[in-house]
Amino acid sequence: MKTPWFTKLAVYAIIVAGALLFVFPFIYMILTSFFTATFSLPKPEEVLQVTPNFINYQIVWGKNHFAQYFSNSLLITSVAMVGALLISSLTAYGFARFAFPGKEGVFRLFLLTMMIPSVINIIPQFIIVKNLGLVNTYSGLWLIYIATGVVGNMFFLRGFFESIPRELEESVLIDGGGNWRIYWNIYLPLSLPAMGTLAIFVFQATWEEYFLALTIIKSEALRTLPIAILMFNDKYATNYGQIFAASLIALLPVILIYVIFQKRFVQSGFNEGAVKG
Amino acid sequence: MLSGKSIKKTRWQIGLKQWLSVLPFVAVGIVGVLVFVVYPMIQNIKLSFQEFNIMPGTKSPWIGWDNYRGVFDDPNDKFMIALKNTFLNVLVTVPVNWFLAVFFAVVINTRFVKMKVTFRTIYYLPIVSSWIVVALLFKYLFADGSGGFVNYALIHLGLLSDPIAWKSHYWSAMVMIWLFHIWKTVGWGVVIYMAALQGIPRDLYEAADIDGASPVNRFFRVTLPMLKPITLFVLINLINGAFGFFPQVYFITQGGPMNQTQVIPSLIYMEAFKHFHFGEAAAMGVMMGILVFAVTFYQMTKIGKQRLF
Amino acid sequence: MRKRISVLLVLALSALLAACSGGNDNASPGDGASSAAPAESSEKAKDPAKKVTIEYWHTYSDSEEKVLVEKIKPMFEEANPSIELKLTRMPYEGLKDQVIAAVAGDAAPDLMRMDIIWVPELASKGALKKLNDLPGFDDVKASVFDSPMQTNFYKGDYYGVPLNTNTKIAIYNADTLKEAGLDHAPATIDELVQAARALKGKDKQGIGISGIHAWGLLPYFWSLGGTVTNEDYTKVDGYLNSPESVKALETIVGWNKEGLVIPALLGGEPGAWDGLKSGQYMMIDDGPWFFSIMLGDAANEFDPIGKTVRALLPAGPGGSHSVVGGEDLVTFANSKHPEEAWTFMKWMLGEEPQQIMVDAGMIPTNKNAANAIDTTKNPYIGPFIEQLNTALPRTPIPEWGEMETIFNLSFEKAIRGEQTAADALNEAVKQISSLLGD
């Protein structure tokens, strides 16, 4: 059955129109970042005619410890991401594959924690980190980032893990392998799309987090990138060109991570993958 | 024949054995959650019955239900307004979000469309960008007067005669918050649905083709039923997301004008950290938790048993 | 049966949790005490020259921070070789949240420069250290202006010292002022209103109320004869809703209806600065940073000195009253180095450091330093110092934070036309009175 050209055109028109809606604000942001007249709201006519330049990018990179915070953030986020993926997948594996008394109870309790708004949990969390002697260390941050993400991540992964057919485990069992081998050789490889998706979520959430980072990290030298961006938001006036230049630089790693992991992310449905695997 | 006692004993033994074998996998995760999530939550509940004293080492006296009463005694009805907005946000954004997600996913997934991955990447961009940055961007696009891009575009398209002061009126502020939320999150649903669509076996469509089904017919007979389990997952997430509005309000309107656009999480945050009303903030959190739990409990039990995909 | 096991398990987990957290509480402070504290005291005993580091949180801007780092810090450390001043610049956004978290977690800095309106509130929570019985306090108090000093007052004691003060003056776009038919800044509110009316047909606005908040509204409210509280700041009934106050608010509402007030009042565009620069706004009011930021910004093309006319706020039936702003220097109740912190506070309030901060656009609170300013060299600071004579503080009480929310809301309701001025103010009085506990 051949598709008529006008149907094709209509379908493409819809997709492109949708894509424009999603991408245009970013384009407008990029255009604004070329704008050097400071502390004013740039007018649309001016923005649309701006000449590309990198003046704001240069200024921003050298200001508010931007470069240093950038690398701090890279370190914190990478470790948090790897840690969260490991711990969450292990926990999800335990919940998906093992039967044990009280499993449903624990699961419900975990789900309940997702319902109560956690915005004021920061004070007890900070006190725990302090009692552990981890104030002003990245370990303190990592502990909180990883632990607070476990519930949601596990919730997400468990579904994937449960969809992996049990028969696949038999080959490992025949080879004399145990639960760890099953986790490592069967579950992880087969759920790579899910792990890739999760990696993006975790990376992004950690990358933009500033409140905990500001609370736990006391030395200016150890601070993270979102704090540098906040510093551009002055008490008295906003410099849109600089803020957006800084934001765009901050956006790059996330997009990079996304492009890297998205190949994995849902190329084939994992149902299909599992059967083939 | 086993006596009751030994059945119990073996049950305990089996339970213990099961725990021992699963513990290596889940121990770190469970302890982490208990310490950094459950414990703060318990503190939160405790706090809702106390008059919180921020100074370490000082006593926070127990005051019973006073915080809860305080929440409802408010002459400005902040909590009720926030509650109303929270439900309104769910009612408005969830259907729109869901429809757009299915719509775009199906359209992009049309057989002849090329560059699927590119389009998916573009649709997903807002999701991976930081809330703060995107909020700033939206505030900037929706700036008042003809200097704001949205006003400028609407005027040039002839849809508006005068620029709108978006954040100054309740409804325009709410529309802005909704647009912001939908723009930021639709990509997630699109990606999930695209994955699910690709998971639908080809032969089902071929069978439908043999029956002579039209594309629309095929969509309703094959696609939609096959998407049912994932739709449940998507809806629950969309509902939870709409209940959990925080950056959408906090970074865009700060609850203004006149606290009219406040939602519960942003209200909690501002009550606690701007006005030192930790007790009342905690009480609101507890009530919100119970509410959301009640609303989603039915689906939760379903999710607990059903495969997500 | 299964259910019962789950319940048991949850209980067991909570018990485990309690044990865990209990463990934390017991073990860690113990650890801290056994390792850190003795080490510190022995260090002190062994090596008296050992440096003490005091941490100082501030929110100075780029240009101001430069003066702080390059001049103040070296000068202080040279005068006090045993103390190292560690400067930490905090983002202004969400600053109060950070202070609360730090205080609650016993991790507050030694020193902080904070907005004057926070001091009574934090003092009432017990977060700040009382200063009046410290050696040399009376000397410091005598050396500074009284009204900024009063912002540190709470229940008979002082919890901070005034670091710098400021206020707002009227800033006019010179060209627009001419267009409105004036060759000088309006001296009275009547003159201002007349000029604003002259601009009405030209899509330009003449009355520069910058926003619906106490900081933006109070100068006009006061100058028009309105009052907020009695002199002891204990009563609003009969003050905020007095006939004069109602009339003052009605006048502001009327201006706005007539289109005389800049759209920035309701959060509209252009923003106050942009509007003034483009000439759409004849007048705005703002602090000295308007000039220091523009002069310090290389990319700025607007000449803030030549293109503006600066003057006292126009006088109304109540006089010409601006609002006092500024920052206080405080130390926290949990500071580990109270002596060193106090040493810095005393030093920083001295004549020379206060004069140095003038370069960063700060108006000194030290009387001698203020009197020594050469207003001919600094092109904009003169009117600010003059305006300070009649500027009034926002209600300096712990409840101000909440009071302001109510105040703002009632003014917003009146200005948006949802309530009459009298109704809005009466309702505000009712709410604030219950807040103040009478």
Image (spheres, rainbow, N blue to C red):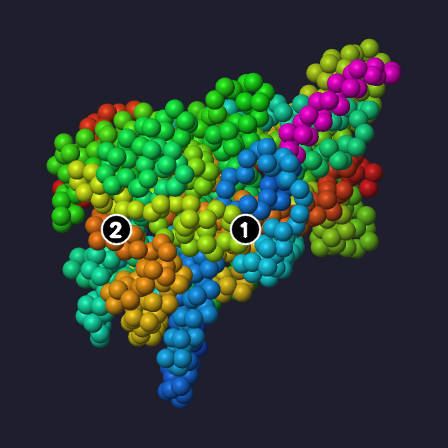
- Callout 2: residue from which chain? C
Q: Amino acid at mark 2?
A: Gln
**Is residue A73 shown to the viewer in this render?**
no
Q: Give the residues drawn in magenta, as a range.
A: A1-24
Quadrant of the image occupied by residue A261? top right
Q: Residue at x 42, y 27 (%)?
A: C203
Q: Amino acid at mark 1?
A: Ala
Left or right placement of residue C356 versus residue B244 in this view: left
User: Circle 1 sits in a helix, a strand or a loop, which is it?
Assistant: loop
User: Circle 2 sits in a helix, a strand or a loop, which is it?
Assistant: helix
Q: Is residue A78 magenta?
A: no
Q: Is residue A23 magenta?
A: yes
**In which quadrant is the C terminus of chain A drawn?**
top right
Left or right placement of residue C227 versus residue B223 in this view: left
Label 2 neighbour load within 10 Å: few <14, some 14-19, many 20+? many
Q: Position of residue B192 (x, y in %)?
A: 67, 33
Q: Residue at x 27, y 43 (%)?
A: C313
Do discs 1 and 2 share a chain?
A: yes
Q: Which residue is mark 2?
A: C387
Which label sits on residue C190? none
The answer to whether residue C79 is above or below residue C71 is below
Between C126 and B227, the residue placed more toward the observer is C126
Quadrant of the image occupied by residue C21? bottom left
Q: Residue at x 18, y 35 (%)?
A: C245
Q: Position of residue B162 (x, y in %)?
A: 47, 22
